[in-house]
Amino acid sequence: MRLGLIARADNRGLGQQTWAVQRNLQPAKTMVVDCPSMQPLQLHTDRFPGAHIVRGLPTEHDYAQFLDGLDVVYTAETGYGDLWSVAQRMGVKTVLHANYEFLDPRDQPTVWAAPSLWNFDRFPAGATHLPVPIETDRFPLTDKPLTASRFLHVVGRPAIHDRNGTLDLLLALQHVTATITVTMTCQVAGYVGSLIGDHQIRTPENVTLRLDSADHDFYWTIYDNQDALILPRRFGGLCLPANEAVGAGIPVIMPDIDPNNTWLPAEWLTPSIVAGDFRAKQHIFWHRTDPHVLAAKIDQLALDNDFYVRAVAKAHLLREQLSWESLTPQYREVLA
């Protein structure tokens, strides 16, 4: 099977996801798409040796050259223009790893692959569930303490409706009783600071808040020396930071909503309520987590030795179940 990969080469989610495919499936050909953007991102084309770099959307000619000699092409989230018709004309199969919020019925891959079970029943008929594997080799396991004191929150590039629940967490920190340090990583400098100022957030003396606005080239390093991830995510299916935290062997606090409750231990999750809705390419409901409830879960990881030790053990089990080593056969089967 000669596999082609359409990739992104930046430090955002699609860049990390397709870089992992490059490393673990070693495609015969790779096309890196540098999409037009009002906020251009630094490219790391060295991650894709020998790749064909396309500035802007690929043309029919770009696709014809790229598809020549391939059996199947993997792309995540989008077909970047006219991939489907050119591939069909050339007899090349296509697999689209599609996120529900951007699901577009005009796309016409051979196989629809869903990275999570979120709204899976709304995918086109014949879709397959294909989880995104964890690069466990990126995360050497280290001994953890008996309770959590160092918490991480990943904002990334802020998404609509505060998708990762940064405000919910800031409000919750005012009610935490344990002595903890919270690191917030955000690729847009000043975003978290503006939330703090706009909402007049005052964290108590027992909570140390660290803001990190660096654009980390090696995503796995942000989990170094962290004990747990706090992600009161308001909506969404695939969540790479949750995967990565499990890869680092640490528990993840998330809302008890789909798809979090289809794969994370129930005791890591917090109740939430539907707080609104909006339309991307699909209709989306978003949730809010009560600050007191979220603070109590943080305190539980920080103060209950047995609870935290059990949570770390469960993270280690999940890490192995979702590793590339475990899931590569499923990828080979779908691509074949």
Image (cartoon, rainbow, N blue to C red):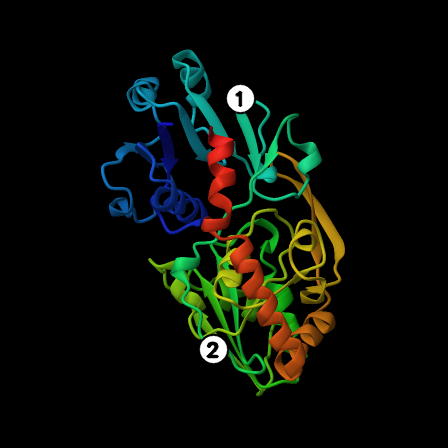
Residue 204 pos. (x, y %): 60, 84
Mark 2 or 1 closer to N-term? 1
The total of numbered circles placed on residues is 2
Please tell me the numbered disc located at residue 58.
none
Residue 168, how many percent across, how many down? 64, 65
- In this rendering, is residue 322 above or below 179? above
Horizontal relation, residue 50 to residue 330: left or right? left
**Numbered label attached to residue 143:** 2
Q: Position of residue 268 (x, y in %)?
A: 67, 66
**305 is higher (above) or lower (below) than 286:** below
The residue at which mark 1 appears reads as 108
Neighbours of disc 2 within 10 Å: few (<14), some (14-19), many (20+):
few
Look at discs 2 and 1 and give the one toward the viewer.
2
- In the structure shown, which secondary structural element does the residue marked by tag 2 occupy? loop
> Does 255 sit left or right of 313 as displayed?
right
**The N terminus: image quadrant:** top left
Can see residue 199? no
Tag 1's secondary structure?
loop
Q: Are the residues tagged 2 and 1 within 8 Å (C-beta)?
A: no
- The residues bearing labels 2 and 1 have C-alpha atoms spaced at a distance of 47 Å
Q: Is any atom of residue 257 visible in this view?
A: yes
Q: Quadrant of residue 32?
A: top left
Left or right of 16, for residue 329: right
Q: Residues within 10 Å of mark 1 (few under 14, many from 20)?
A: some
The quarter holding residue 201 reads bottom right
Going by the numbered disc 2, the residue's amino acid type is: Asp
Identified by mark 1, the residue type is Gln
Residue at 37% over, 30% down: 3
